[in-house]
Amino acid sequence: DAKTTQPPSMDCAEGRAANLPCNHSTISGNEYVYWYRQIHSQGPQYIIHGLKNNETNEMASLIITEDRKSSTLILPHATLRDTAVYYCIVRVAVPDSNSGYALNFGKGTSLLVTP
Amino acid sequence: EAQVTQNPRYLITVTGKKLTVTCSQNMNHEYMSWYRQDPGLGLRQIYYSMNVEVTDKGDVPEGYKVSRKEKRNFPLILESPSPNQTSLYFCASTLLGGVNSPLHFGNGTRLTVT
């Protein structure tokens, strides 16, 4: 699976948009970009995923560059409850019998939302 | 409510005393997995299971056993726990065969081995 690079930490004011970048320059054509977050030692929570088109759901938006080498997760109106570690993960979508579907979470970006 | 349930949430035990951490999911997922999370090392996969009676080692399987006798349950067994197994453990599950099925995680089990 392709490796990702994220900034270790970011701050965001409550109510403002939080834009979390991720570089994945070695991504393959069949690999998706997934975002998860982990709030203070709770289980990681799925946010969104995409292949090449921009995606939006009730939690966030995902913007993927045309060359697919980077992406940005956008939380449009950050709240204090969005303070968490955000993980960008790149991998094939459907696990095969040999892959184990292990996700390489890396170190992620620690987002602090301030009042 | 669709969920992955782990028990117990917290466990303190002594070296060598066998323990089992249970994991159950109510989403009819084929795939289940165990991770451990340690400071500076991130989440690492211990074992996974693609279906009933099918289990495979992940990246850090030493000292652990698992079983998958039923689709919904995937217990993690530590036959002889040691202090280096002190960690935060997560169980996860997903459907196989679809791009829109992410991993669902339990809320974790914090294990301390003294």
Image (cartoon, grey):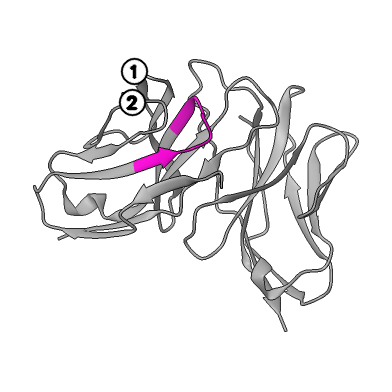
Q: Is residue B19 above or below residue A76?
A: above
Whether residue A43 is in magenta: the answer is no
Q: Amino acid at mark 1?
A: Glu
- Mark 2 → mark 1, Cα distance in angstroms: 5 Å
Marks 2,1: beta carbons within 8 A = yes
Of residues B26 and A35, the one drawn nearer to the viewer in this rendering = B26
Range shown magenta: B23-32
Residue B77, percent across and down? 23, 38
Residue B88, quarter of picture: bottom left
Per the image, the residue denoted by label 2 is: B68
Q: Chain of mark 2?
A: B
Residue B94, percent across and down? 55, 32
Same chain? Circles 2 and 1 = yes
Residue B107, percent across and down? 45, 54
Q: Amino acid at mark 2?
A: Arg
Of residues A75 and B52, the one drawn nearer to the viewer in this rendering = B52
Secondary structure beneath label 2: loop
Q: Is residue A27 visible?
A: no
How many numbered dots are placed on residues in this image? Answer: 2
Q: Is residue A17 left or right of residue A113?
A: right
Per the image, the residue denoted by label 1 is: B53
Tag of residue A36? none
Q: Residue at x 72, y 38 (%)?
A: A33
Of residues B11 and A104, the one drawn nearer to the viewer in this rendering = B11
* First along the sequence among labels 2 and 1: 1
Q: Residue at x 88, y 41 (%)?
A: A54
